[in-house]
Amino acid sequence: EVQLVESGGGLVQTGGSLRLSCTASGIPHADYAIGWFRQAPSKEREVISCISNNGRHSYYVDSVKDRFTISSDNAKTTVYLQMNSLKPEDTAVYYCAAKITGATSVSVGMYAYWGQGTQVTVSS
């Protein structure tokens, strides 16, 4: 059974930091990319960041560049999203997802497996 489990969300004040974790198991391919997405109320789900299987390639949406950093552990079973200088507009449910074959993609539809999401709330 494929499982993607996010953790690390919570309530933080503007300017604060959180680190989200995404732990993957049961993915039936050794070569997969991980993406972080978020969805705010009444808005579409958007890609925030993604990282290739070998960790050499990553992507950030403009709104989080220089504030968020994606990384993975040596075993590549856990992907982290370090979020600094958080703003109220970062408030959303954050999801991680796995895309089979290791290239990154900004397309929601390219990701086959999804976690349940973790709430991030940034107070002003």
Image (cartoon, rainbow, N blue to C red):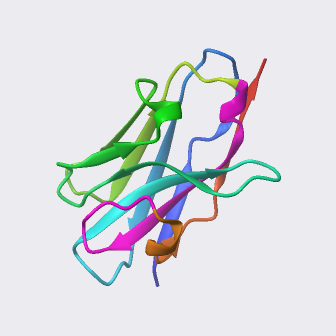
How far across and down, in percent of the image, does residue 54 sit? 17, 57
How far across and down, in percent of the image, does residue 66 sit? 40, 24
Q: What residue sits 26% from the left and 64% below the top?
A: 103
Question: Quadrant location of residue 31?
Answer: bottom left
Based on the picture, tell me whether residue 97 belongs to the magenta stretch: yes
Q: What residue sits 23% from the left and 61% below the top?
A: 53
How far across and down, in percent of the image, does residue 115 sit? 56, 65
Say above or below: 63 vs 104.
above
Say above or below: 31 vs 93.
below
Judge by depth and name the residue closer to the eye, 123 or 42: 42
Q: What residue sits 70% from the left and 44% below the top?
A: 92
How far across and down, in percent of the image, does residue 119 sit? 70, 46
Based on the picture, tell me whether residue 102 belongs to the magenta stretch: yes
Magenta-drawn segment: 88-106
* Residue 1 shown left or right of residue 11 in the figure: left
Say above or below: 44 vs 92.
below
* Residue 3 shown left or right of residue 117 in the figure: left
Question: Quadrant location of residue 80?
Answer: top left
One can see residue 72 in this view: no
Judge by depth and name the residue closer to the eye, 45 or 11: 45
